[in-house]
Image: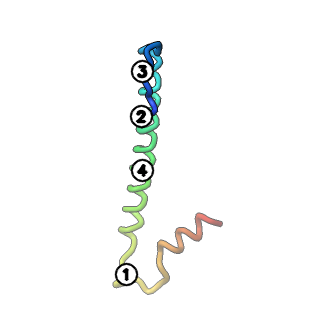
Amino acid sequence: MLQELKIEANQQCGHIKETVDAKIADLNRKIKDLTAMRKALKAMSRLCVPEISERSCHFIELLEEETQ
């Protein structure tokens, strides 16, 4: 990632800053998406109680609903 910021003698600092700020924004979006995914997976995990569940796996049921 940082290797992409090849510094050349004629590059303006403003251009480099724009590139760095764009990378930061991209990372923030990815972190937000991953945090939401982790939250959803934790919620799914809490629903699974294999010792008392007599039905099929709730994870599989949720995945099947999403693909339909």
Q: Residue furthest bottom?
A: 54
Q: Earlier in the sequence, mark 4 or mark 1?
A: 4
The amino acid pointed to by label 4 is Leu
Question: Which dot, 4 or 2, sits closer to the camera?
Answer: 2
Taking depth in this image into account, of 59 and 3 the one nearest to the observer is 3
Q: Earlier in the sequence, mark 3 or mark 2?
A: 2
Q: Which residue is mark 4?
A: 34
If the image is split into quadrants, where does the C terminus sit? Answer: bottom right
The amino acid pointed to by label 1 is Pro
Q: Residue furthest right?
A: 68
The amino acid pointed to by label 2 is Gln
Q: Which residue is mark 2?
A: 3
Q: Which residue is mark 1?
A: 50
Mark 2 and mark 4 in contact (Cβ < 8 Å)? Answer: no
Q: Is residue 36 above or below residue 54?
A: above
Picture residue at 59% right of the left edge, 68% below the top:
65
* Residue 51 shown left or right of residue 16 in the figure: left
Residue 17 is marked as 3
Picture residue at 49% right of the left edge, 82% below the top:
56
Give the distance between the C-alpha atoms of the residues marked 4 and 1, in whole angstroms: 26 Å
Give the distance between the C-alpha atoms of the residues marked 3 and 2, in whole angstroms: 15 Å
- Judged from the image, the secondary structure of the residue bearing numbered disc 3 is helix
Q: Position of residue 30 (x, y in %)?
A: 44, 44
Category of crowding for the residue at label 4, using alpha-carbon neighbours closer than 10 angstroms: few (below 14), some (14–19), many (at least 20) = few
- Judged from the image, the secondary structure of the residue bearing numbered disc 1 is loop
Picture residue at 34% right of the left edge, 84% below the top:
51
Give the distance between the C-alpha atoms of the residues marked 1 and 3, in whole angstroms: 52 Å
- Judged from the image, the secondary structure of the residue bearing numbered disc 4 is helix
